[in-house]
Image (cartoon, helix red, strand yellow):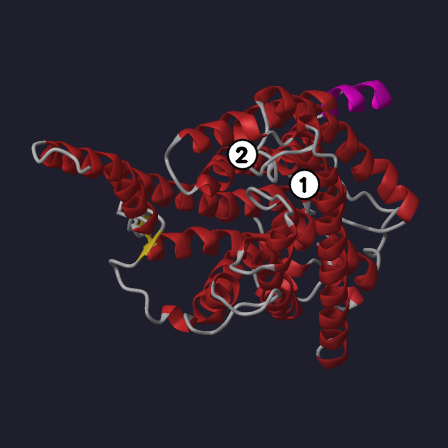
Amino acid sequence: MGFPRRSVPFLSALAVASALPLSQALAQTAAPAPTPELSAADTAWMITASMFVLLMFVPGLALFYGGMVRKKNVLSMLMQSFFSAALLTVLWVAVGYSLTFTEGNPFFGGLGKAMLTGIKPETLSGTIPEFVFVMFQCTFAIITPMIIMGGPADRMKFSSAMVFLALWMLFAYVPVAHMVWGPGGFLMNAGVLDFAGGTVVHINSGVAGLVAALMIGRRKGGGVEPMAPHNLVLTMVGGSLLWVGWFGFNAGSALTSGALAGLALINTQIAAAAATVSWVVVEWLAKGRPSLLGAVSGAVAGLVVITPACGFVSPGSAMVMGLAGGIACCAGATVMKKALGVDDALDVFGVHGVGGILGAVLTGVFASAAYGGEGKSGWIDGNFAQIGLQIEGVVVTVLWTAVVSVVALKLIDVVMGLRVDAEVETDGLDLALHGETVHS
């Protein structure tokens, strides 16, 4: 017995209707991922962030360091900063960007985009032009090596310093950045979290600064003659520019102008403020008086500590990290330096090394999916294993940069020497190396 003829249209419609959700699901499954579109808002923010980070370097870091060295060496420090910004930009465009952000192996990218080959004005990286991404990452690549120079300040040849910074950027900064942020990077694949450069920038440069200070040796008269900063006004101005520019550094690492950038922005401010307070309180208790140098150093310490975590943690966690960073870095810049017996002239390891390591580990503690998104969980979310991954990132970075730094410095020492003559060091690097002096 068959269905009545008049039932056929009804059954056909029913079959079509029941199949429609399945066909829609299949169509959705088969549909290609949407093509990224240019966002004017994101582009405007990333151009601004790039300028902020460049402001951190010239004049920010230059003035910060320049005020802390002795008067006879201030122009040498400014020259190192200004010239290295140009030299390292050339290297970044030539090969650095390609080796960092293209496919290759877990440690280095390829050379497919050397000299920015193949990138057109309309080429996108996410929702921004790739040229803007290249520029933003360039500012990271040029400021990081110069942080190192605070360690061997007052005694390293200008020529040797520039050769070292070039080698170090190519063989320490580039591979660590590729491992953490590049496609197929070793530490990225392992699950290490670093939002804006705790490992790539701060541990990397902090350890290199310590190595350089150790290999070059103590300043002439170190521990005997006064080595006080010659102009704390310059240091405070430079430190303030670092604080302001760091918003580009951290919030810019969201690569959009959205909610994630806002989270990184507020966390950056909170951590810097908290670390300033804790450093000054510790110093006040230990020495009986607070200092401007301590306050500025505390702000930088907080900025360093929050860098790897700023897009992954709550504002409350950022405050805890800042408070811890001020205390730890104050100890690193005083107690630890004396214990190690190293003349880290401008406390590069005490602030960037100690702060970077602490920030990386605490990222594994405080990272929360509620703020950073899926897969960005630490101990606070019950993912205790993330602390181990963060420690793995620290160890790999420390070993890599230490080996590269030792080899590069040793080669330069054999070929051209690292340190200025004793007479030059006594008279000052400004006049001997650059034929210029500061007139007050």
Instruction: Please identify the quadrant where the C terminus is shown.
Output: top right
Image height check: is 175 above or below 384? below
The residue drawn where x is 55% and y is 58% is: 79
Q: Point out the stretch of residues depicted in magenta.
A: 279-287
Q: Is the magenta stretch mostly helix, strand or loop?
A: helix
- Label 1 amino acid? His
Image height check: is 148 above or below 324? below
Q: Is residue 221 within the magenta segment?
A: no
Residue 382 x/y as whole percent: 70, 29
Q: Nearer the viewer, mark 2 or mark 1?
A: 2
Q: How many marks?
A: 2
Q: Distance between the residues labelled 2 and 1?
A: 37 Å
Residue 69 x/y as whole percent: 68, 47
The residue drawn where x is 60% and y is 44% is: 194
Which numbered circle lies on residue 379? none
Mark 2 = which residue?
A: 311
Image height check: is 162 above or below 125? below
Residue 422 x/y as whole percent: 80, 65
Q: First in sequence, mark 2 or 1: give its number.
A: 1
- Element type at mark 2: loop
Q: Do the residues labelled 2 and 1 touch (CB within 8 Å)?
A: no
Mark 1 = which residue?
A: 230
